[in-house]
Every structure is written in structure tokens, then in C-alpha cells.
Image (cartoon, rainbow, N blue to C red):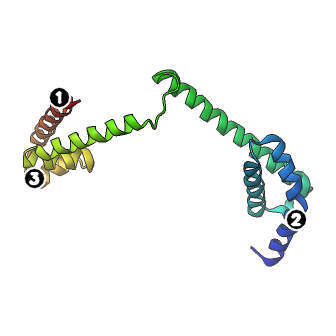
Amino acid sequence: MAAEAISDLEALTRKFRPALIAFFSRRAASHAEAEDMTQEVFIRLAQSRVETVDSTEAFIFRIATNLLRDSWRRDRVRSSYRMSVTGEHGVNVDALDPHRIAAARETIRILWAAIQALPEPTQQIFILYRVENIHKQTIADNFGFNVRTVEKHITRALVFLARRVGDRS
């Protein structure tokens, strides 16, 4: 950005910052959010071509209005998502419930122990296919197996793991 453009932006910041803070403070949830949105206005202003604008003041407040609309839309989408999640899984369920996290970690520990208990070629094939996302044909070529043999190893591993995890949960 040219030095002249920077000084113009600084002048616009000094002139419009208090008005923008007031504008956003009346509409935003907090003063910090108003500050952030004001900063975003000046970032967008710096990225745009102000020379082609008839009224800089109108342009600045159009940016501010669009930021508010974007924020409201984002909040509405998030709220809608939260409502759909709580509606499906129960009211006031915390997705980061410590008990659920501990149970998930225990299940992962059991699953990893079960994977390590698999016979060697089955374990390697399962990890390559399910964890590393390598195609069955590539695995078959590397092991010198038929694709059907690789599929049988994967099926054996899945059955074994389902039994191990199912027995301990």
C-alpha cells in the first residue's frame, strides 16, 4: 500500500472510528465486538478501491451495515445449528461433557489395544486401509495379495475390533 493511501486511511480512521464504535455499540453484544467490527471496516476499506467511491462516508457505513448483516446471519445459522443439535440429542446436552470425553478416551484406548492385538498382516492392512486411506489395490500390490484377500483381512479386523470394543463397553 502506498504511503499516501496509508495516511488517507489513518485520517479516515481518526475521523470515523468514534462514529463506527457508537454505531456498532448500539447493535453489537459487547464493546469488544464493536471494536472488532470497527477494525474489520477499516481492513475492508484498505482492501477496496476508495478512489472509485462517490461518498466515502456512505461507503464506510455500507461496509459497517454489511458486517452487521453478516454477523447476524452467522449468529442465526449457529443458533439454528445449536437448536437442531439439542433437539436431536436432548435438551441442554453439553457437547464437551467431561464424562463423555473420558468415555471416548477409554473407548479409543480399548480400540487401540484391540488393533495392536490383531495378527501382523491383518493389523498392517487394517491400518493402511482405515487410517492411512490407501486403496485396497495398492495394499494388495504391496503385500503380493489378491484384492479379495485384503478385503478378508479388513473384514476380520472389523469383526475382531467390534467384538473387543463391544465386550468392554
> Which residue in the protein does label 3 denote?
143
| Image-based side of 24 in relation to 153, left or right | right
Residue marked by disc 1: 167
* Residue that carries the numbered disc 2 in the rendered image: 14
Percent x, y of residue 26: 84, 42
Badge 3: residue crowd in 10 Å (few <14, some 14–19, many ≥20): few
Secondary structure beneath dot 1 equals: helix
Q: Which residue is nearer to you in this view: 93 or 6?
A: 93
CA gap between label 1 and label 2 equals: 67 Å
Residue 51 vs 24, above or below: the answer is: below
Q: Measuring from the top left, give residue 23's x and y in whole percent.
A: 85, 47
- The image position of residue 65, as x and y in percent, is 81, 44
> Does dot 3 land on a helix, a strand or a loop?
helix
Q: Type of residue at label 1? A: Asp
Q: Nearer the viewer, residue 19 or 32?
A: 32
Q: Position of residue 103 (x, y in %)?
A: 32, 36
Which circle's residue, 1 or 3, is located before the other in the chain? 3
Q: Which mark is residue 130?
A: none
Q: Count neighbours of disc 2 (C-alpha within 10 A) and say few if under 14, some if 14 to 19, many if 20 or more.
A: few
- Left or right, 84 with respect to 126, comes to right
Relative side of 14 to 168, left or right: right
Q: Quadrant of the C terminus?
A: top left
Quadrant of the image containing the N terminus: bottom right
Q: What kind of element bears circle 2? A: helix
Q: Disc 1 to disc 3, how far (Cα)?
A: 32 Å
Q: Is residue 87 above or below residue 133?
A: above
Q: Is residue 90 above or below residue 64?
A: above
